[in-house]
Amino acid sequence: MKQLIELEINGQRQELLVEPHTSLLQCLREQAFLKGAKRGCDSGGCGCCTVLVDGRAVYSCMTLVMSVEGRSITTVEGLSGEGALDPVQQAFIDAGAVQCGYCTCGMMMAARQLLDDNPDPSEEEIRKGIAGNLCRCTGYAKIVEAIRLAASRRQGHSVGEAG
């Protein structure tokens, strides 16, 4: 039986009618019409569906939407604001860290939490921070470069600019 729940998605309150067994990923894609989080493995093994719940990265495929009622959900679509991309989003573009793009949104969300927790991570800390997100196209070099670039930009430095 469907139940009415209230979520804050990308800063906006939404009331949604959901089945108790509905995943957050299903709800975001099918009811909120946000397509950034991707369906990959459906078992929390690839990270394509990563979103932030109260600022913490979670696999939306493994999270029941009922368990996040009343909490703040941020998707990749909610990172940008006021006509500008988030520094993480812009850095992924500038560093060429997008390849096929399937994992990109999940990588960006993991990177966002990492940089919120640690504004100046080492390469090892970056690799650990994105370890739950798989990319089948790259050796992660451009992704790590993008996260370093985003960290630098968030701190107001121009060191490490991609070109």
Image: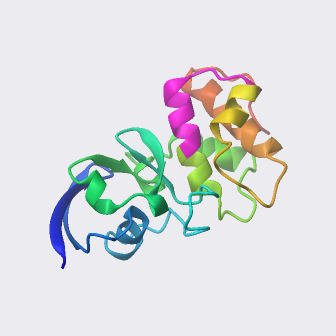
Confirm whether the magenta stretch covers residue 135. Answer: no
Query: What range is drawn magenta here?
Result: 110-123
Relative image position of residue 160 (x, y in whole percent) = 76, 27
Residue 82's quadrant in the figure? top left
Relative to 146, is 121 above or below?
above
Asked whether 112 or 132 is in front, the reply is 132
The C terminus lies in quadrant = top right
Confirm whether the magenta stretch covers residue 112. Answer: yes
The color scheme shown is rainbow
For the point 29% across and 54% down, the residue is: 67
For the point 80% across and 60% down, the residue is: 137
The N terminus lies in quadrant = bottom left
Q: Which residue is at the far bottom? A: 1
Answer yes or no: is residue 87 visible: no
For the point 57% across and 55% down, the residue is: 105
For the point 62% across and 49% down, the residue is: 107
Q: Is residue 35 left or right of residue 127?
A: left
Q: Is residue 20 left or right of residue 40?
A: left
Q: Which residue is at the far right? A: 139
Asked whether 116 or 160 is in front, the reply is 116
Relative to 154, is 29 above or below?
below
Prevailing SS of the magenta stretch: helix
